[in-house]
């Protein structure tokens, strides 16, 4: 094995380790919040705490990396769901469910950034730039599937904003069913076309 192939293998291993850490951290953040102990994330990922700190020296860096990782996963899921789902409506509903899970994880992000408003603004812009077009494509596909001339009664940005508002209570109240409320919102949006 050459030095170059060793380096490529190590880079690929490092990327896989980082992805495993991000997946584990996201799962822990859903159940325990962004202030969860690093040891809980390490245990879930099956690595030592030193490995986490080597990739993400501070908690804000870890939280931002998880946030970006989840935005990318949510963005990438859009076209995959359109291809794999029986209908565009099913794809939209499945994507919305992923988006809700992401939003529940996102709560606590501002606190983790400790008043870094510039960082928070940049993350919000990244979020909007990546996810609004995906939601828009799914929403348009769901309406296009119903027949010509149907226009969604709300644009993707406002649908996502409404979903976000419905998710706010989920972090603090285990009895609050954000998923169900959001799916009811989607039902209303889909039933509110210009038919």
Image (cartoon, helix red, strand yellow):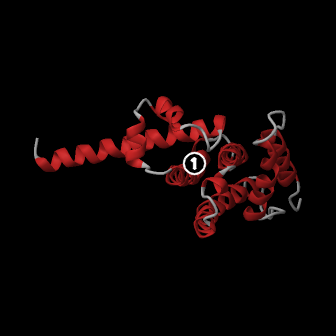
Which image quadrant: the N terminus? top left
- Residue extending farthest bottom: 118
Q: Quadrant of residue 137?
A: bottom right
| Residue depicted at x 50% and y 52% | 65
Residue 165 lies, with reference to residue 101, above or below; the image says: below
| Residue depicted at x 55% and y 50% | 63
Q: Position of residue 3 (x, y in %)?
A: 12, 48
Classify mark 1: residues with Cα within 10 Å, few (<14), some (14-19) or many (20+): some
Q: Quadrant of residue 46?
A: top left
| Residue depicted at x 66% and y 54% | 111
Which sits in the foreground, 37 or 194? 37
The number of callouts visible is: 1
Q: Position of residue 89 (x, y in %)?
A: 73, 47
| Residue depicted at x 78% and y 52% | 163
Which image quadrant: the C terminus? bottom right
Q: Quadrant of residue 131?
A: bottom right
Q: Position of residue 184 (x, y in %)?
A: 85, 44
Residue 35 lies, with reference to residue 72, above or below; the image says: above
Judge left or right: residue 10 versus residue 144: left
- Residue extending farthest left: 2
Residue tagged 1 = 77
Q: Position of residue 77 (x, y in %)?
A: 57, 48
Judge left or right: residue 103 versus residue 163: left
Local SS, label 1: helix
Judge left or right: residue 51 versus residue 95: left
């Amino acid at each position: 094995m050459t030095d170059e192939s060793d380096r490529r293998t190590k880079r690929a291993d490092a990327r896989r380790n980082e992805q495993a850490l991000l997946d584990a951290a996201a799962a822990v953040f859903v159940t325990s919040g962004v202030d969860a102990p690093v040891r809980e994330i390490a245990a879930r990922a099956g690595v030592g705490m030193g490995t986490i700190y080597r990739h993400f020296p501070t908690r804000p860096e870890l939280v931002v990396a998880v946030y970006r990782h989840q935005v990318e996963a949510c963005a990438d899921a859009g076209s995959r769901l359109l291809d794999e789902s029986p209908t565009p409506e099913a794809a939209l509903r499945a994507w919305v469910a992923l988006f809700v899970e992401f939003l529940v994880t996102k709560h606590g992000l501002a606190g983790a950034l400790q008043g870094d408003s510039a960082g928070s603004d940049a993350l919000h812009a990244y979020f909007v730039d990546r996810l609004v077009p995906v939601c828009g494509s799914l929403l348009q596909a769901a309406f296009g599937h119903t027949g010509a001339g149907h226009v969604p009664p709300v644009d993707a940005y406002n649908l996502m904003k409404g979903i976000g508002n419905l998710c706010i209570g989920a972090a603090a109240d285990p009895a609050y069913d954000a998923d169900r409320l959001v799916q009811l919102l989607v039902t209303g949006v889909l039933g509110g076309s210009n038919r």
